[in-house]
Amino acid sequence: MGELMFLAHRIPFPPDRGDRIRSFHILRHIAQRRPVHLLGFVDNEEDRKAAKELMPMLASLHIEIRSKSRLRAGIEALALGEPVSVAAFGSRRITRMVDQLLDERPIDTIFAYSGQMAQFVPDDRGGRRFIMDFVDVDSEKFAAYGASTGGLMGWVHRREARLLADYENGIGRWADVNLFVSEAEAALFRQRAGLAAAHVRALDNGIDAVRFDPAGFPRVEGAEPMLVFTGQMDYRPNVEAVLWFAQRTFRAIRAKHPNVLFAIVGRDPTPEVRALAKLKNVIVTGGVPDVRPWIAAAAVVVAPLDIARGVQNKVLEAMAMARPVVASPAAFEGIDAVPGEHLLVAQGNDMANAVGHLLGNPHEGDAMGQRARAHVIRRYNWETQLLALDALIGNG
C-alpha cells in the first residue's frame, strides 16, 4: 500500500469549527491506516503553531499562512476568468511542494478537501487515485447570495456561482470519486454534473458523543432560561441568521418570556453582530475556550439559518448534548432525524412559537433532548461513518 497526500484548504486543527471537525476526523481515520502527507493553509501564526500538534500522526506536514487579501484574489480572478474562491487559495509554494512530494514519495492517492484544493492536483496524475471531498455544493450558496443581493455585490455573487459551478462540474468529472456531506448534496451534484451514483457519494458527518456528553456539564437550577446559537460569527449565513433572530424572532419570544436570554457564541463576531449586545437580554461572547458549557446551559439551541449547505454540526452537537433544538428548514436539511421527535423544524413566526412552546414546557424539551442524543449516538458515530473510506482509498 502506498502513501496518501491530503490537501486541505484549512489545516484541520484544532477541530473546533465545522470544516475542521470533518477534515480532522477523516485525516485521523486515514492516518491510522497508512502514511499521510498533509499540505494546506492556516489563517494566522497561532493556527500554524497549533497545527503542529498533528505531527505525530503524519508522515509530513507542510503549512502556508494564507495572506492573500480578498481584493487581490478578486483582481486575479477577474484577470484569469476564474472563481474568486479558487484564486483566493492559489499558491506557487504549495504547487511546488506537491510536485516535489509526488516525485520523491510513493504516493498513490491524492485526497483533496474542499473544492479550492483541486487546483493543486497535477493534470498528469501518473495513475494516482484522486478523491475529491467537496463537502457541499458551494456554488449553490453563492447562487442564493446572488438571488438575494442587488447591485454590484449581486453581480459578484452571480458571477461566482456560475464560474464555481463550472469549476466544480469539471473537477467532479475528472476525479475518481466525489464525496459530499449528505445524500441531498450528492444527489444535487449528480444531477447537475451528469454523473453516476458510483462517482458521487455521500459521506456523512459524525459526532463525538463522548466529548459532547451532557453528563460532564450539570445544569444550574433556577438560572434564567437561555437560547443559544453557536458558530463562526464572521460567516455570512451565521451573521444573517443571528441578526434576523435577535431583531425579530427574539423580540416576539421575549413578549411572552421576558426573562429569556439569547447568547450568540462564536469567534470573530462582525461589528453588526457585536452591536446586537446592545439589545436587551442579548449576549455576544466572541470566541470561547469551549462551547459545550454554553450548549449545556441552553434551554433551547436555535439554528435559524436561511442559507445553509450540507450538514450543520451545530445542530448535531446540540442534539448530542441532549438539548432541544429548533432549526430552520435550511439548517435541518441533510440531517437524518425526525422533526417533532428529535428536534423541531420551523421558520419565521413559527420559529418563535416553537421556541416559546419549549420554554413553557421544559420537561417536554428535556425529553426531546434525550431522544436526540440517543439518536445521534446510533446514527452519527464517526468511526461507523468513515468505514466507507476504506474501500474508496484502499485502507485496511
Image: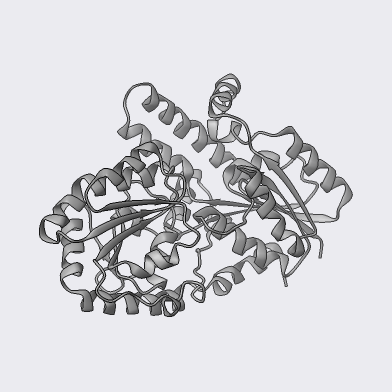
Q: Which residue is rendered at x = 69% and y = 65% of the image? A: 30
In this image, 312 relative to 384: left or right?
left
As drawn, the residue found furthest toward the top would be 79
At which x and y percent is residue 45?
66, 44
Q: Which residue is rendered at x = 80% and y = 47% of the image? A: 126
Q: Which residue is rendered at x = 22% and y = 44% of the image? A: 247
In this rendering, is residue 266 above or below 73?
below
At which x and y percent is residue 323?
33, 71
As drawn, the residue found furthest toward the right would be 104
Q: Nearer the viewer, residue 129 or 249?
A: 249
Q: How is the image coloured?
A: one colour
Q: Which residue is rendered at x = 19% and y = 46% of the image? A: 248
In this image, 325 relative to 234: left or right?
left
At which x and y percent is residue 58?
76, 60
Which quadrant, please, contains the N terminus? bottom right
Q: Nearer the viewer, residue 264 or 117?
A: 264
Q: Nearer the viewer, residue 220 or 292?
A: 220
Which image quadrant for residue 336? bottom left
At which x and y percent is residue 274?
36, 42
As drawn, the residue found furthest toward the left would be 256
Residue 336 appears in view: no
Residue 279 appears in view: yes
